[in-house]
Image (cartoon, grey):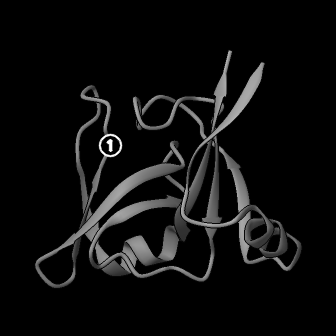
Amino acid sequence: MQVVQTQTGLKSDTIEEGIKNGRYLMVNVLGDTMEPTFRHGDIVFVDTEKRNCSGGGIFHFTGMGSNIARAIQIAGDRVELYREHPAYQTIKMSKSEFDSMLVGKVVAHLKVLA
């Protein structure tokens, strides 16, 4: 197995410090809902202090079977979760429901190559 860093907006020492102080979480991607961007087994770094979904982005959340989705806020109190894989439908929910499951925003990504 080979690990290659493919996307990061952060310096490695910033990520390391953030993991030590609990700001950043390392999360294994589960499932194929975000292919081709993320594949099962890839690792994402989640900033638990970035919890605002206005303007969109890729977020880590709990409680829906898959743990990563692209979220776009729309029309006031509604949020749509887009999965990149075409086999999965968009999920619509209230902002308060999304906020209750939200862990943080994905800020870096390690792609695991077999």
For the C terminus, give its image quadrant.
top right
Instruction: Give left or right: position of 105 versus 95.
Output: right
Viewer-proximal residue among 8 and 46: 8
In the rendered image, which quarter is residue 34 located in? top left
Coordinates of residue 65 in the picture (x, y in percent): 52, 43
Instruction: Give left or right: position of 71 versus 60.
Output: left
For the N terminus, give its image quadrant.
top right
In the displayed structure, would residue 89 be above or below residue 54?
above
Instruction: Give left or right: position of 33 versus 56.
Output: right
In the rendered image, which quarter is residue 85 located in? top left
Q: Is residue 28 visible?
A: yes
- Label 1 crowd (10 A; few <14 / some 14-19 / many >=20): many
* Residue in the image at 40% along x and 71% along y: 98
Element marked by disc 1: loop
* Residue in the image at 30% along x and 68% along y: 56
* Residue in the image at 36% along x and 64% along y: 57
Coordinates of residue 61 in the picture (x, y in percent): 53, 61
Residue farthest toward the left in the current orientation of the protein? 75
* Residue in the image at 82% along x and 66% along y: 16
Coordinates of residue 110 in the picture (x, y in percent): 64, 42
Coordinates of residue 43 in the picture (x, y in percent): 66, 43
Q: Is residue 62 visible?
A: no
Give the amino acid at mark 1.
Answer: Arg
In the rendered image, which quarter is residue 41 located in? top right
Residue farthest toward the top in the current orientation of the protein? 114
* Residue annotated with mark 1: 83
Viewer-proximal residue among 40 and 112: 112
Viewer-proximal residue among 91 and 114: 114
Total number of numbered labels?
Answer: 1
In the displayed structure, would residue 86 be above or below residue 46?
above
